Image (cartoon, grey):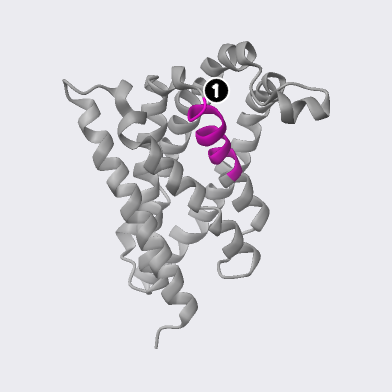
């Protein structure tokens, strides 16, 4: 009998997988004229913002023990992506047509379709070995692509507009700093914070793929 927690996680992960698959399908035409990669935010931005905001539930799942993930790690990943898409891209129209936004959204959508599909089938205990392998292998190129030429390059392009408009001055003024300075600090720290997450997934890869290999030998 399926437990309520399994039913909930299956429903949540299935919905996320479907949502990111729809985002991927919306992005694909951007590769073919007359549509261009500069239209990526226009065709998929609202959906990506919704899915990424909704993912705050994963921090809650970790905090209440529904999944075996460190809550802080889940929050850091959610916070970094959500800040990028809501505080930067959504608020600065000039960067929305950047190729770097397309790169980010495409890397996210591919990785999330794989990740959430894997979570769904793992929860149901019917996940095939090839999907587990894909889950813990596809991130190797996708994560760096999404972060470097994607998120970081977009935030760098946003800096002049952030400074010109003194974005979020009401909030950051309380701390005697500007959002521009904060964003520069974020860019400086981003590679180190990202590397922590990246290496964590590599550790998971060694553990998970080792188990799959042991099952095959058995």
**Residue 214 or 183: which is nearer the viewer?**
183
Residue positioned 49% across, 28% down in the render:
89
**Residue 118 or 165: which is nearer the viewer?**
165
Categorize mark 1 by other alpha carbons within 10 Å: few (<14), some (14-19), many (20+).
many
Residue positioned 37% across, 30% down in the render:
41
Residue positioned 36% across, 28% down in the render:
102
**Residue 214 or 186: which is nearer the viewer?**
186
Quadrant of the image occupied by residue 9: bottom left
Q: Tell me which segment is drawn in magenta.
A: 79-91
In the image, is 175 to the left or to the right of 68?
right
Where residue 105 sits in the image (x, y, percent)?
39, 35
Up/down of 207 relative to 40, above or below = below
Where residue 216 sits in the image (x, y, percent)?
34, 68
Up/down of 199 relative to 174, above or below = below
Magenta stretch secondary structure, dominant: helix
Q: Is residue 213 visible?
A: no
Q: Is residue 26 magenta?
A: no
What quarter of the picture does the N terminus occupy?
Answer: bottom left
Residue located beneath label 1 in the image = 155
Residue positioned 60% across, 61% down in the render:
60
Where residue 188 sits in the image (x, y, percent)?
67, 23
What quarter of the picture does the C terminus occupy?
Answer: bottom left
In the image, is 144 to the left or to the right of 28?
right
Where residue 201 sits in the image (x, y, percent)?
53, 49
Q: Secondary structure at mark 1?
A: helix
In the image, is 52 to the left or to the right of 77?
left
Quadrant of the image occupied by residue 48: top left
Q: Is residue 89 visible?
A: yes
Residue furthest to the bottom: 1
Residue furthest to the front: 170
């Amino acid at each position: 009998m399926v437990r309520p927690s399994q039913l909930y996680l299956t429903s949540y992960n299935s919905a996320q997988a479907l949502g990111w698959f729809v985002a991927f399908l919306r992005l694909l035409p951007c590769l073919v004229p007359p549509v261009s990669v500069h239209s990526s935010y226009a065709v998929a931005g609202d959906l990506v913002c919704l899915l990424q905001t909704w993912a705050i539930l994963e921090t809650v799942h970790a905090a209440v023990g529904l999944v075996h993930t460190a809550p802080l790690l889940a929050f850091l990943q959610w916070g970094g992506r959500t800040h990028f898409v809501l505080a930067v891209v959504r608020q600065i129209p000039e960067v929305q047509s950047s190729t770097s936004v397309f790169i980010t959204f495409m890397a996210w959508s591919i990785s999330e379709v794989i990740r959430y599909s894997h979570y769904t089938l793992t929860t149901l205990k019917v996940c095939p070995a090839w999907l587990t392998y894909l889950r813990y292998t596809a991130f190797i190129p996708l994560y760096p692509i999404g972060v470097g030429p994607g998120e970081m390059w977009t935030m760098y392009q946003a800096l002049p507009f952030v400074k010109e408009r003194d974005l979020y001055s009401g909030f950051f003024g309380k701390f005697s700093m500007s959002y521009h300075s904060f964003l520069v600090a974020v860019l400086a720290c981003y590679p180190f914070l990202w590397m922590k997450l990246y290496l964590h997934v590599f550790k998971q890869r060694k553990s998970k793929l080792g188990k799959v290999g042991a099952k095959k030998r058995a």
